Amino acid sequence: MKRKRGVETAVGVFIVVGIACLAWLSMRLGKVEIGGGNQTPVTAEFASVAGLRAGSAVEIAGVQVGSIESIEVKEYKAVVRMRVQRDIGLPEDTIASVRTRGLIGDKYINLSPGASDRMIPAGGKIRETEGALDLEGLIGEFIHGSAKK
């Protein structure tokens, strides 16, 4: 009887450890971070973010350093909340631009760090932004002859 209870305990411990390992592996593969991880929140206001979605990449020099958390409208401007790696210091004169991968690819935010010695604090705001380029509007203007020469 004692031997059977010991085997049941060992099997129970094995199952609990297995479930814990699967949970840890799922979070690592899904890039889920508990407690904010090594990322810090930053916001930016844009005149237009056409095609940009929550979850899109935030890049510096073509390397992903974060992701877009949410996009909302405040005072007729698009407010983009993003999370950027904590070890990436963003100078105050950083420029955030909405870019497209290829001709009709996904939209993402490109950060161009400036030369200022002062850094944007956690939860701070990027002041310089460039909205999305409306390619359809430009083509329409060109076709109908109203493009500036």
Image (cartoon, rainbow, N blue to C red):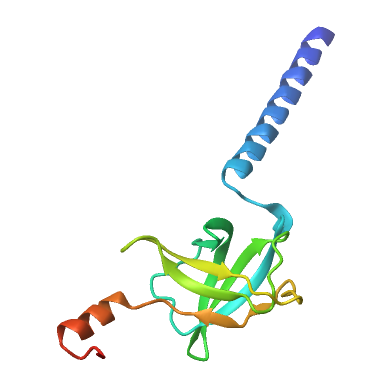
Q: In the visual, does 104 lie left or right of 54?
A: left
Image quadrant for the C terminus?
bottom left
Observer-nearest residue: 70 or 94? 94
- Residue 2 place in picture, x, y as percent: 84, 10
- Residue 116 place in picture, x, y as percent: 71, 77
Q: Residue placed farthest to the right in the image?
A: 2
Corner quadrant of residue 99: bottom left
User: For the image shown, how many numbered marks are present on the structure?
Assistant: 0
Q: In the visual, does 133 lie left or right of 121?
A: left
Q: Is residue 8 above or below residue 17?
A: above
Observer-nearest residue: 99 or 56? 99
For image coordinates 69% across by 62% down, the residue present is 88
Corner quadrant of residue 127: bottom right
Q: Residue placed farthest to the front in the image?
A: 149
Q: Is residue 44 above or below residue 6?
A: below
Observer-nearest residue: 116 or 55? 116
- Residue 38 place in picture, x, y as percent: 72, 56
For image coordinates 68% across by 74% down, the residue present is 115
For image coordinates 76% across by 75% down, the residue present is 117
For image coordinates 75% across by 74% down, the residue present is 121
Corner quadrant of residue 148: bottom left
Q: In the visual, does 135 lie left or right of 117?
A: left
Image quadrant for the N terminus?
top right
